[in-house]
Image (cartoon, grey):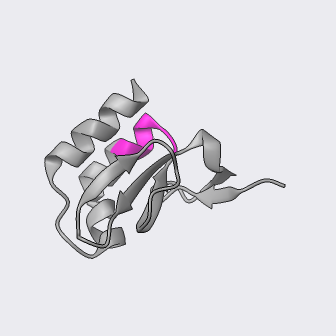
Amino acid sequence: MERLRMCIACRTRKDKKEMTRVVKAKDGVISVDPTGKADGRGCYVCCKDCLAKCKKSRLLNRAFKCEVKTDVYEKLEGEFE
């Protein structure tokens, strides 16, 4: 059974393993989740173009309802390279 998730930037649905998960833990720390299993509120980004859109439109801020630091975006960029 496929585990489809939606990219927060382009809104396309893809398999969970094809996307990169960003998670906000209960203590408020936002980080990249390479395992896809960390506890907390998660959202998905599918590609480098969508990451650029997230950064420009500040979509992670909206998804997590808080300010996301630039180092989180830098870590995400490292995941797509």
Left or right side of 12 for 78: left
Q: Nearer the viewer, residue 68 or 52?
A: 68
Residue 3 is left or right of residue 65, and the answer is right
In the rendered view of the protein, which quadrant contains the N terminus?
bottom right
**Residue at the spot x=32%, y=29% of the render?**
78
Q: Is residue 71 left or right of residue 5?
A: left
Q: Is residue 79 above or below residue 81?
A: below
User: Observer-nearest residue: 5 or 33?
Assistant: 33
Residue 23 image point, x, y percent? 38, 59
Vertical position of residue 27 compared to residue 71: above or below: below
Q: What residue is shown at x 39% (from left), y 23% (from top)?
A: 81
- Most extreme residue toward the bottom is 65
Majority secondary structure of magenta residues: helix
Q: Residue furthest top?
A: 81
Say if the magenta span includes residue 16: no
Residue 71 on image: x %, y %: 17, 44
The quadrant in which residue 73 appears is top left
Q: Position of residue 60 (x, y in %)?
A: 31, 61
Please name the residue shown 56% across and 59% down the image.
11
In the image, which residues are magenta? 46-51
Choose between 13 and 32: the one closer to the eye.
Answer: 32
Q: Please count the marks in the image.
A: 0
Q: Is residue 46 left or right of residue 53?
A: right
Q: Is residue 50 magenta?
A: yes
Question: Residue 57 sits in which quadrant?
Answer: bottom left
Please provide percent x and percent y for residue 68.
20, 60
